[in-house]
């Protein structure tokens, strides 16, 4: 099989095995390095990078290189992984070995050892018993646990995510995929939760979000089920979820195709992620309680619920202001008895609207005076994007040149490495530039003005729950203050607006 993988790319994974313990690490790795280079040469493989694990056999608490490698494999960044040997595992252990095998199988990445080439996409079922893995049992156990616990977060700044759910975007920070809130969607996600907590059903939420211009990522409109899926997803409170799906591999139970099963919630593994939450934990939990049928909010018949629910806090003690009925009219009262004087809800509500109108006017004046100039940021971003396109074309051309015989393998390898490094660096710059631009846009007073205008436009037509959701979309919190024995309208409100 000489040069059977000519021009294909590989990562080499180097580490000392158990049997080599006591030997000088650098010396062992140097030998492996050489052996893998020879192996690569035989197959015509181009080594893009070496992952050398220098952690000794007993301090396996972390294998940062292995985790980096798996991440690159999952992302499909190479055609093959070269390593010296694979330790044998029993069949039983193999079964629940999911992640590592999946990474190779799903990305179609080959495992190349000096003795044999493994293609898990083809061979996994036949060779299961025979298949050996990179790690001894114990190492496997630790790594697998780590993978499931939110992966690289304790090792490097990043966390593993497969796809960005609605409200987030997948970004790469220092080569590690993570999530970043995407505010135009995140805002709608908060409204979904708010509406549900206020007694709306998923169907009616889907309709309202659609009316507000929301579109899901992979279909044309939100449905009852897609809303319900969002409301159950702990990603929105900064968690990472594992084990939502299980797989039955082809032919293992007489099935001709690979089968994916969606596991019940009890089987999920939920851990802390690195990405920011976009929904408050209390709100999320309230929604979960309602969904589980443990808690019934007052049915929304248009006569109940405060449009100011969850919005006002007592400035003195920080407690939420509560809606109570006195002489048939709704009032706001601090939950701490005797803390501060209450005020009529409608008075507070109209004061809030007045404030929003004032704010809108200010913002419109500000906007007319000085529209922020986004051009430099936009130009930077498009320059980076152009450079990235050039680098990607270079990468494609290198392969052509190799096939045409213009480049010998060492030259190709060297050039490819340079181009790959360039691409990685540019992707990093691109992310930073995109983030800056989004931030600049978020501070654009005209955008905030538009949001407030939208709230004011829709407000009068909305019922209590809709009004509540609208206010929550622009206001973070309002601090309320009223001394005792003062006139009904003698209360003060301090506004904390949402920043973007
Ligand atoms: Zn109070």
Image: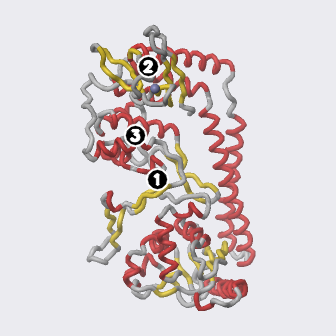
* Structural distance between the alpha carbons of marks 1 and 2: 35 Å
In this orientation, does residue 46 appear? no
Q: Nearer the viewer, mark 3 or mark 2?
A: 3
* Structural distance between the alpha carbons of marks 1 and 3: 15 Å
User: Tag 2 or tag 1, which sits nearer the N-term?
Assistant: 1
The C terminus lies in quadrant: top right
In x, y percent, where is residue 113? Answer: 57, 85
In x, y percent, where is residue 310? Answer: 41, 30
Q: Nearer the viewer, mark 1 or mark 2?
A: 1
Classed neighbour count for the residue bearing mark 2: other residues with Cα under 10 Å, few (<14), some (14–19), many (≥20): few
* Structural distance between the alpha carbons of marks 3 and 2: 26 Å
From what the image shows, is residue 312 above or below residue 405? above
> Is residue 481 found left or right of 421 in the rendered image?
left
The secondary structure type at the circle numbered 1 is strand
User: Tag 2 or tag 3, which sits nearer the N-term?
Assistant: 3
Identified at 66% across, 49% down, the residue is 430
Front-most of residues 294 and 466: 294
From what the image shows, is residue 161 above or below residue 309? below
Label drawn at residue 239: 1
Classed neighbour count for the residue bearing mark 3: other residues with Cα under 10 Å, few (<14), some (14–19), many (≥20): some
User: Which residue, given by chain and number where applicable, does mark 3 sit on?
Assistant: 283
Label drawn at residue 250: none
Identified at 41% across, 25% down, the residue is 334
Image quadrant in which you'd find residue 35: bottom right
Residue lying farthest to the front in this orientation: 338
User: Which residue, given by chain and number where applicable, does mark 2 sit on?
Assistant: 457
């Amino acid at each position: 099989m000489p040069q059977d993988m000519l021009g294909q790319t590989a990562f080499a994974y180097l580490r000392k095995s158990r049997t080599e313990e006591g030997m000088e690490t650098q010396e062992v790795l140097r030998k492996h390095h050489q052996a893998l280079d020879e192996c690569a040469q035989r197959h015509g493989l181009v080594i893009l990078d070496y992952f050398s694990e220098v952690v000794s056999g007993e301090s396996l608490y972390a294998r940062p290189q292995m985790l980096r490698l798996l991440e690159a494999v999952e992302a499909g960044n190479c055609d093959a992984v070269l390593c010296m040997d694979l330790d044998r595992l029993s069949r039983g252990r193999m079964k629940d070995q999911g992640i590592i095998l999946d990474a190779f199988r799903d990305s179609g990445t080959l495992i190349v050892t000096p003795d044999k080439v493994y293609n898990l996409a083809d061979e996994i079922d036949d060779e299961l018993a025979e298949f050996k893995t990179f790690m001894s049992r114990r190492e496997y156990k630790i790594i697998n646990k780590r993978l499931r616990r939110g992966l690289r977060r304790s090792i490097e700044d990043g966390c593993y995510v497969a796809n960005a759910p609605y409200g987030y975007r997948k970004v790469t920070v220092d080569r590690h995929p993570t999530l970043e809130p995407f505010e135009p969607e995140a805002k709608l996600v908060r409204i979904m939760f708010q509406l549900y907590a206020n007694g709306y059903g998923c169907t009616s939420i889907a309709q309202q979000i659609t009316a507000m211009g929301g579109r899901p990522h992979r279909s044309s409109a939100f449905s009852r089920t897609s809303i319900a899926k969002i409301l159950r997803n702990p990603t929105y409170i900064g968690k990472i979820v594992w084990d939502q799906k299980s797989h039955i591999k082809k032919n293992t139970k007489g099935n001709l195709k690979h089968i994916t099963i969606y596991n019940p919630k009890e089987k999920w593994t939920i851990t802390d992620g690195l990405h920011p939450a976009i929904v408050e934990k209390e709100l999320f939990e309230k929604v979960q309680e309602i969904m589980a049928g443990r808690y019934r909010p007052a049915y929304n018949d248009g006569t109940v619920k405060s449009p100011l629910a969850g919005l006002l806090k007592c400035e003195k003690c920080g407690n939420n202001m509560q809606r109570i009925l006195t002489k048939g009219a709704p009032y706001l009262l601090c939950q701490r008895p005797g803390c501060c004087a209450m005020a009529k809800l409608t008075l507070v509500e109209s004061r809030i609207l007045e404030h929003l109108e004032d704010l809108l006017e200010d913002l419109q004046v500000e906007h007319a005076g000085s529209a922020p100039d986004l051009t430099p940021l936009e130009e930077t971003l498009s320059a980076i994007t152009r450079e990235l396109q050039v680098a990607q074309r270079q990468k494609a051309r290198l392969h052509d040149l190799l096939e045409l015989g213009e480049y010998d393998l060492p030259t190709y390898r060297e050039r490819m490495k340079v181009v790959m490094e360039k691409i990685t660096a540019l992707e990093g710059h691109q992310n930073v530039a995109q983030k800056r631009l989004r931030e600049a846009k978020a501070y654009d007073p005209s955008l905030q003005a538009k949001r407030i205008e939208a709230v004011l436009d829709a407000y009068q037509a909305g019922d209590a729950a809709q009004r509540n959701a609208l206010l929550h979309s622009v206001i973070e919190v309002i601090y309320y203050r009223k001394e005792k024995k003062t006139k009904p309208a003698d209360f003060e409100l301090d506004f904390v607006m949402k920043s973007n």
